[in-house]
Image (cartoon, grey):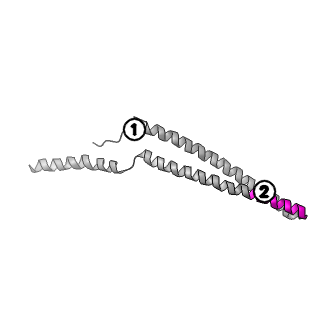
Amino acid sequence: MRNRTFIVALLALALGVPAAAVAQQPSDTTRDRHEMRRDRRELRQDRRDSRGDRRDVRQDRRERRQDVRAGDSTAARQETRDIRQDRRDLRNDRRDRRSDRRDVHQDRRDLRGDRHDTTQATPKTP
């Protein structure tokens, strides 16, 4: 009687606890989905930030025009340098956003594939 109770308790512990632990943890696709959502938010925020950079270029052009009208060639040269740097920053940001967008698209494809993948069964414990 004692041995049977002990064996039943061991079996319940061996079969029940890992199953409960697996049930409580989110699946990989859930984590991936949350990560993808964060990445998309970052992409939108980066796009908003680039609007400010384009505004900086416009502002520098305006200032350069005013400096040229006023005859201040040193300030105009500095504004030209600022414009070049701002445009370079914009180009680099655009390149980064493009690669990030490609990564997000690939992640979405992978996530869809994982969701519909029939070979991935939940791990069963012995």
Q: Residues within 10 Å of mark 1 (few under 14, many from 20)?
A: few
Determine the main secondary structure of the stretch shown in magenta: helix
Of marks 1 and 2, the one in the foreground? 2
Q: Is residue 10 left or right of residue 106?
A: left
Q: Label 1's element? A: loop
The residue located at (83%, 60%) in the rendering is: 64
**Can you tell which mark lies on residue 3?**
none
The image shows residue 9 at horizontal and vertical percentages of 18, 50
Q: Quadrant of residue 60?
A: bottom right
Q: Is residue 109 left or right of residue 68?
A: left
In the rendered view, tell whether residue 40 sits above or below residue 67: above
**Can you tell which mark lies on residue 83?**
2
Q: Which residues are magenta?
A: 56-72
In the rendered view, tell whether residue 36 sits above or below residue 78: above
Q: Quadrant of residue 116?
A: top left
| Sequence-earlier tag: 1 or 2 | 2
The residue located at (67%, 51%) in the rendering is: 93
Q: Is residue 47 visible?
A: yes
**Which amino acid lies under the numbered mark 2 shown in the image of this protein?**
Ile
Cα separation, mark 1 vs mark 2, equals 53 Å
The image shows residue 120 at horizontal and vertical percentages of 39, 38
The residue identified by callout 1 is 120
**Which amino acid lies under the numbered mark 1 shown in the image of this protein?**
Gln
